């Protein structure tokens, strides 16, 4: 039981509505049949086992060199159970924090279709207030066969880096309170649960530099923690700062996890996750797009 | 921590694997309480149920391990809150077994609880989280301090400011409902 009078000099009483909620609200929620949860869990476990078996066969065929290469670029050799959800842009949970920008709005910066195009001088640009669509990866940045995922396409979990903090907590709180705007985009190749996927989020975040450092420290601190293994695969390969991390968790004899790439350009930071080939190349292209938007690099 | 959930998790066959029955009892004991906590934090009963179902699904997947924990409920609560506070949570869930009771859950909360949720939504994130964890989830200040990686004094400050703001917001709500002629019976 909590100490309900934690600061004994408190001069503001506790609203009784809080205790009313605590005592009555649980009764408002009716649990779905447990069988539905068990069935969903079984489907997910079966899927992971199948993918793990496929990865194991590739390791056997490819030898040690294949394993090393797999961690960096191979689509089939990526850790199992990682299927980024292909959901389209979403607003911040806290509306006051930043605008949710519908795709139809005129972007702050004119989109460029080629990351290599010469951007206007930074001095002529107004400061960014939203993440423009042109900051996002495009189909031309990926190998052929991908499509932009529809908003309501299904996806699975365990693929976002912050998810893994439940297995190894960060030493410090993620400095994410100053977020201004964000945008998400997902791509799929293939159908169903075995489709390759690329998920990207770009945030306009004045604390982007600290965020990147936060995750670097987390990856170092959590290199081996219980069943969790975190490996920094690469660093400093794009933008003003970058990090590629592999996370692997062995649970019930099944290994699953993901590869995550963070790239920062100025106040823009992107996280790219997924089951796809050439994470590093994709990250470099993402950085080029951020550079074009930020007018730097 | 619900005693029912703890005992359900620990009831196992001697020498055998944790039973499905123990998970079912644990699931039933956890669900409402966690969903209520998360709905107070997220301000959305449906989203809270999604998060809770995902957390319980993960508990089922690791039930052999989780059921052996001293406090299985604490593990599920932490997973649920991680999902709820994750920047990615809106795109996490694949659950298709949800949503039947969504509208009913919100309606069943009752007008006073709905008003509280509306007021909580106006609090800054960290204040709201501290308030919910302390007064609704019954976590101690020390536990909240550890979970949020914040000094005890900071947590106390969040609770103090949160209480003050909440009191004001709820008083406004009362005034407005009175003006609107709501019959409080």
Image: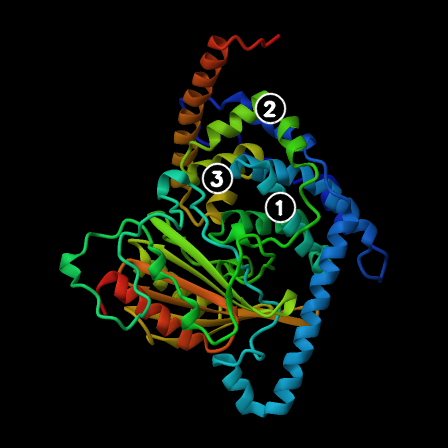
CB under 8 Å between callouts 3 and 1? no
Neighbours of disc 2 within 10 Å: few (<14), some (14-19), many (20+): some
Pick the front one: A206 or B100: B100
State the mark number for residue A58.
Answer: none
Chain at numbered mark 2: A
**Residue sitting at the far left:** A123
State the mark number for residue B50.
Answer: 1
Percent position (x, y) of residue B182? 55, 11
Q: Which residue is labeled 3 in the image?
A: B129
Pick the front one: A240 or A254: A240
> For the residues tagged 1 and 2, is the chain the same?
no
Q: Residue at x 56, y 90 (%)?
A: A64
- CA distance for labels 1 and 2: 23 Å
Neighbours of disc 1 within 10 Å: few (<14), some (14-19), many (20+): many
Q: Secondary structure at mark 1?
A: helix
Q: Which residue is labeled 2 in the image?
A: A20
Q: Secondary structure at mark 3?
A: helix
Quadrant location of the N terminus of chain A in the rendered image: top right
Percent position (x, y) of residue A144? 49, 75
Q: Please indicate whether residue A163 sits to the left or right of residue A293 in the image.
A: right
Chain at numbered mark 3: B
Q: Residue at x 54, y 78 (%)?
A: A75
Percent position (x, y) of residue B179? 46, 9
Percent position (x, y) of residue B88? 49, 54
- Classify residue A293 by image quadrant: bottom left
Q: Residue at x 41, y 71 (%)?
A: A140
Q: Please indicate whether residue A270 sits to the left or right of residue A192 in the image.
A: left
Neighbours of disc 3 within 10 Å: few (<14), some (14-19), many (20+): many
Pick the front one: A194 or B38: A194
Q: Secondary structure at mark 2?
A: helix
- CA distance for labels 3 and 2: 17 Å
Q: Nearer the viewer, mark 1 or mark 2?
A: 1
């Amino acid at each position: 039981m909590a100490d309900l009078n934690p600061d004994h000099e408190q001069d503001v009483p506790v609203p009784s509505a809080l205790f009313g909620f605590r005592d009555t609200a649980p009764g408002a929620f009716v649990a779905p049949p447990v069988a539905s949860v068990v069935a969903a869990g079984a489907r997910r476990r079966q899927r992971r086992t199948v993918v793990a078996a496929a990865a194991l066969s590739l390791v056997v065929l490819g030898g040690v060199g294949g394993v090393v290469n797999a961690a960096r670029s191979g689509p089939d050799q990526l850790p199992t159970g990682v299927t980024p959800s292909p959901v389209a842009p979403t607003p911040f949970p806290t509306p006051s924090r930043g605008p949710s920008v519908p795709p139809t709005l005129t972007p702050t910066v004119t989109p460029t279709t080629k990351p290599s195009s010469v951007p206007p001088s930074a001095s002529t640009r107004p400061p960014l207030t939203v993440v423009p669509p042109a900051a996002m990866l495009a189909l031309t940045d990926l190998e052929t066969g991908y499509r932009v995922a529809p908003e309501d396409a299904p996806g699975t979990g365990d693929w976002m880096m912050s998810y893994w903090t439940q297995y190894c907590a960060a030493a410090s709180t993620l400095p994410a309170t100053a977020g201004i705007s964000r945008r998400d985009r997902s791509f799929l190749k293939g159908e169903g649960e075995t489709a390759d996927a690329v998920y990207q989020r770009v945030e306009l975040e004045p604390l982007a530099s600290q965020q990147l450092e936060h995750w670097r420290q987390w990856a170092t601190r959590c290199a081996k923690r219980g069943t969790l293994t975190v490996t920094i695969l690469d660093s400093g390969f794009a933008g003003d700062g970058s990090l590629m991390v592999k996370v692997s968790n062995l649970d019930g004899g099944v290994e699953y996890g993901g590869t995550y790439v963070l790239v920062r350009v100025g106040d823009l930071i992107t996280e790219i996750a997924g089951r796809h080939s050439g994470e590093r190349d994709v990250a470099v292209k993402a950085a080029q797009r951020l550079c074009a938007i930020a007018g730097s690099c | 921590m619900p005693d029912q959930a703890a005992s359900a998790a620990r009831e196992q066959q001697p020498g055998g694997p944790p039973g499905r029955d123990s998970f079912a009892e644990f699931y039933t004991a956890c669900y409402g309480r966690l969903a209520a906590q998360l709905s107070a934090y997220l301000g959305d009963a449906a989203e809270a149920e999604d998060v809770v179902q995902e957390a319980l699904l993960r508990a089922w997947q690791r039930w052999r391990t989780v059921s052996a924990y001293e406090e299985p409920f604490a593990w599920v609560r932490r997973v649920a809150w991680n999902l709820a506070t994750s920047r990615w949570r809106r795109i996490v869930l694949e659950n298709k077994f949800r949503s039947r009771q969504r509208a009913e859950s919100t309606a069943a909360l009752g007008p006073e609880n709905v008003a509280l949720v509306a007021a909580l939504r106006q609090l800054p994130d960290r204040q709201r989280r501290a308030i919910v964890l302390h007064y609704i989830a019954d976590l101690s200040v020390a536990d909240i301090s550890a979970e949020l990686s914040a000094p005890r004094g900071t947590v106390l400050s969040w609770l103090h400011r949160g209480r003050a703001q909440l009191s004001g917001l709820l008083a406004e709500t009362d005034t407005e409902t009175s003006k609107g002629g709501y019959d409080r019976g």
